[in-house]
Image: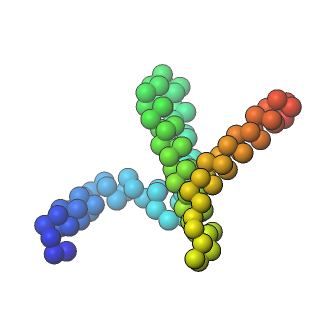
Amino acid sequence: MDSPYESREMDRLTRPGVAEASKPFVGSNFQAALKDLEGRMREAASNLEFEEAGRLRDEIKRMKLLDLEFANEALTGAGEEVDRSAPKKWRAEAAAEKAEAFRKGRL
């Protein structure tokens, strides 16, 4: 921590409440964090707080997309170029499968 900016960042990160608030997003707690956000989104919607529910929905989508992008990079072999469009293709395929299941009455 040579610069004053780094020390300010450490102060911000070690401030009471910050570490606890970010804990669900650390490490292997990704699925738990998603479930927590989905629960909070549903609760906000049931309380007619639609702006908050929409914000949480967008956060869930962002987190899922980041997870897909990370998995794509992790699964790409050494020396290969990362296909940046792959997560979007996967999402489109999953949405098409879900729509097909809905049309066939399986959902």
Residue pictured at 63% horizontal, 69% vertical: 75
Question: In which quadrant of the rendered view does residue 94 lie?
Answer: top right
Q: Residue furthest top?
A: 48
Q: Residue furthest bottom?
A: 78
Residue pictured at 77% horizontal, 41% vertical: 97
Where does the C terminus fall, quadrant-wise? top right
Q: Is residue 105 above or below residue 12?
A: above
The way the protein has been coloured in the rendering is rainbow
Q: Nearer the viewer, residue 1 or 78?
A: 78
Residue pictured at 43% horizontal, 31% vertical: 52
What is the x, y in percent for residue 65? 55, 50
Question: In which quadrant of the rendered view does residue 83 lie?
Answer: bottom right
Q: Nearer the viewer, residue 2 or 78?
A: 78
What is the x, y in percent for residue 29? 53, 60
Where does the N terminus fall, quadrant-wise? bottom left
Question: In which quadrant of the rendered view does residue 12 lie?
Answer: bottom left
What is the x, y in percent for residue 54? 48, 31
